[in-house]
Amino acid sequence: MLTDLQKHLLNDFQRDFPLSVRPYLEIANKLGVSEDEVLSALAELREDQLISRVGPIIPPNRIGASMLVAMAVPEPELQRIADIVSRFPEVNHNYEREHRFNLWFVAVASTADHLARVLDAIERETGYLTQRLPLVDDFFIDLGFRLDLSHA
């Protein structure tokens, strides 16, 4: 069960996250709680795997380098490999697809060299090769979800 604070964090700050030196303090002030309470609530959401990260979504190749990546992973290994991939802070998200290349993700890094090193590290840690795909078309999917706070 989510606390009221967790519900507000999930609902109210999917967009327009404060861009300041202390964004969590700014959020705390808006919600009438302490900065420590905000940080603790977010940590609990991460521990409970209700969120994976708090951070910006930057259009591909606008800042640094980004790439769509696919991996062919045997089904029994898929969750373990996805968990390894998700541990890299350069990976925005990953998802399963019904195809021989069944694990896909977007990786973003400060430079093309840094991105190549990250993908090389993913290959070393997982034991599977990455298929590195160039950006041909830019798509933006708004993944914000309005939560019903009375039933959440």
Image (spheres, grey):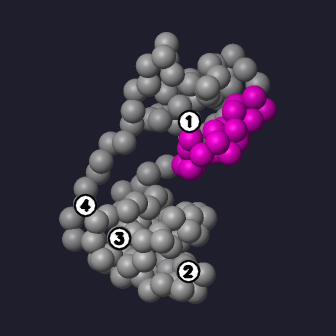
Instruction: Give the quarter of the figure containing the N terminus.
Output: top right
Element type at mark 4: loop
State which mark lies toward you, 1 or 3: 3
Distance from disc 4 to disc 3, alpha carbons, whole Å, reads 21 Å
| Chain-order first, disc 2 or disc 3 | 3
Distance from disc 4 to disc 1, alpha carbons, whole Å, reads 26 Å
| Chain-order first, disc 2 or disc 4 | 2
Q: Which residue occupies the extreme front position in the image?
A: 76
Q: Residue at x 45, y 35 (%)?
A: 15
Q: Which residues are magenta?
A: 36-55
Q: Is 152 located above or below residue 109 in the figure?
A: above
Distance from disc 1 to disc 2, alpha carbons, whole Å, reads 36 Å
State which mark lies toward you, 2 or 4: 2
Element type at mark 1: loop
Q: Which residue occupies the extreme left position in the image?
A: 137
Q: Amino acid at mark 4?
A: Asp
State which mark lies toward you, 4 or 1: 4
Q: Is residue 65 or residue 130 the one in the foreground?
A: 130
| Chain-order first, disc 1 or disc 3 | 1
| Chain-order first, disc 1 or disc 2 | 1
Residue assigned mark 2: 126
Q: Amino acid at mark 2?
A: Thr
Residue assigned mark 1: 18
Residue assigned mark 3: 102
State left or right for residue 68 relative to residue 150.
Answer: left
Image coordinates of residue 103 in percent, x first then y, are 39, 69
